[in-house]
Amino acid sequence: MTRSEGLAKAGFSSLIELAINIPHSYSDTRLSERVEVSKINTIEAEVLSVSRPPKRLLVMVRSHVGERNIEVTVFHPKPYHNALFKPGMKHVLQGRVELFGRKLRMTNPKIVSKTGQIVPRYRCRTRQDIYRRIVDELVSVESLVEEGLERGTAELITRAHRPDGKWLELYRKHGGIGPKTLEALKFAEAFDYFSRMRAKRVRFDAKSSLEGSIEPFLKRLPFELTEGQKGAVSDIAEDLRGKTAARRMVVGDVGSGKTMVILAAAMMAYPHRSILMAPTSILARQLYEESKKLLPEYVDIALVTQGGERGDPSSAHFIIGTHAILYRDLPEADLIMVDEQHRFGTEQRKILEKFHSDGKRRPHYLQFSATPIPRTQAMLDSALIDISLIGSTPFVKDVKSEIVGRRDFAKVKEHIERETAEGRQVLVVYPLVEESEHVGYLSLEESEKFWRSNFDGVYVTHGRDRLKEEVLQEFAQRGSILLSTTVIEVGISLPKLSTIVIAGAERMGLSTLHQLRGRVGRTGLKSYCFLFTNTPDNERLKAFIKTKDGFEIARLDLKFRRSGDILEGKIQSGKEFLWLDTAEDEEIVKRAKEAAGGR
Ligand code: ADP
Ligand code: MG
């Protein structure tokens, strides 16, 4: 059996994958050194006498250890039992020994044919003996070291497949493998993941290396870039200088200033052409305006949306647009960027295909996303695509988060009265549009009356509202309180928004709550986030109000979802691992990545 045959038979594609599938239990056929009551004993037994009461076979045996004889009971004996148990015969029997009065008894023992072994049992698709043979032949300290694992790690893993008595004793005592073995397994799993992903990742030559200076742009900025922005910008500068086509995702919370990073990249590309795709016309227009304002005049900028265009896309240095870009005849570009990547479906793939006509060499490609992922997940993903995380926001947000229940409602109402009296705005988010019996919260429609009778300037919208852009525009100008469902995508900024109240908060994922909370205090305004819930004693919500770091919240979200506290559907992304816990094992993943030769 060759290695690939063995792996194929076992159903794995790598040796490490086979190795980390350690036994779920061990059958131990070594003879006991003494008879232990209430434990599984393996004894060499000499049959002394046999009797046959109804439906039973009672065999008195002398054990190879211990002074007292043991009474063995076989219920519903088969003919071969009768043949096996005859005075004078010797067998190795395995079973639990119990004390009945002063008698030792073993009931329905297993008859062991081969003694003196520790036999591993696996979760596997093939027969145990075939699987064992595959492991025996392929998994060894040497073979694992050859795969790139350190000897210590390889030894810990190999030991789990071929334990000695001492190891097994500890295993039994602790009810499973020890912490060191667990860590070795996690490390090996991460290492294997990185090695395989690295092999999968295809690298293309870049159309050109881009080294434009961003100084003229930085000089025009009314502020300095944050540390997070600088980090992303320097990652990108290094990418674009290279001969390999960049493929990078920049992840940063809403408001972390990704636009500046986009503009800096366009400057690096200049005088070569860049293209930027945004999910909505509003966003595309905003990006266009901002570029016009912040980039030097000599950078020619064009806007392409379904509604029309500005500037001359056929000659512009920087083309900004919606997916309308995909259906227009446009010149080639050396840098392609996609903003708010998480809001696109397959279209972002199309844009790459569209803009590389000459087969082999490709444009640099940068994606920007506001969906925070746990740091560990980002590290794992970075095997396939380079990732920059922007961990800071330009404004230190002053948002006070609080869990409130029914009893606190009067207090919340007073707070809203105060805020709106001062000309600030409030967003109240409801879980559902229509009335529902199951939820235990008022719906948007049900509560509308309450708000309208108590406050002026109440506006209402929801995800399916076709007029929501208009409603939002008007609210921004004149409103006090906006009632909505979670599904609204606020395209416009609401600088006066100081308070958000989220009803039924415990029903939402932490990442959703984080996105919602991100809507207030965008301009550094003292802000408030009230999580309204019928179950205030909620661990997730308590964890949520303690942190503002989007990456940490994504990690918590993952952790709580894992632990079964799933609220909005299933875990959405992320490969499932046998040993690794992507919510906890950041350190191990980091080491494994380095060991596998990652940047
Ligand atoms: P994102 O796209 O990541 O959600 P934006 O790029 O829209 O965030 O930036 C949010 C706000 O922060 C904008 O008003 C922008 O002008 C401002 N901003 C960006 N970078 C900085 C900075 N370094 N210092 C101060 N303000 C900044
Ligand atoms: Mg943005």
Image (cartoon, rainbow, N blue to C red):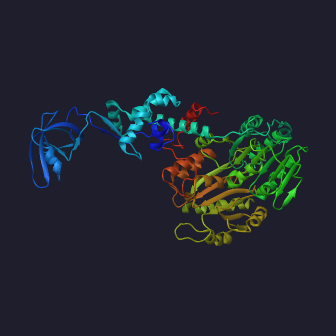
Q: Residue furthest front?
A: 1
Quadrant in which residue 273 is drawn: top right
Answer with left or right where residue 442 lies relative to residue 202.
Answer: left
Answer with left or right where residue 109 lies relative to residue 582.
Answer: left
Residue 449 spot, x, y in % from top left: 65, 72
Quadrant in which residue 392 is drawn: top right
Instruction: Tell me which residue sits at (71%, 46%) in the image.
Output: 367
Q: Can residue 149 be seen in this view?
A: no
Residue 240 spot, x, y in % from top left: 76, 37
Q: Nearer the viewer, residue 100 or 65?
A: 65
Instruction: Tell me which residue sits at (71%, 67%) in the image.
Output: 459
Residue 475 spot, x, y in % from top left: 75, 64
Quarter of the C terminus within the rendering: top right
Instruction: Tell me which residue sits at (45%, 39%) in the image.
Output: 6
Q: In the rendered image of this protein, does residue 134 appear above or below residue 536? A: above
Quarter of the N terminus within the rendering: top left
Residue 27 spot, x, y in % from top left: 31, 39
Q: In the rendered image of this protein, does residue 311 appear above or below residue 104? A: below
Answer with left or right where residue 562 lies relative to residue 70.
Answer: right
Q: Nearer the viewer, residue 20 or 33?
A: 20
Q: Residue furthest right?
A: 298
Number of numbered discs visible in the structure rendering:
0
Q: In the rendered image of this protein, does residue 30 appear above or below residue 289? A: above
Q: Is residue 571 visible?
A: yes
Q: Which of 222 and 591 is in front in this view?
A: 591
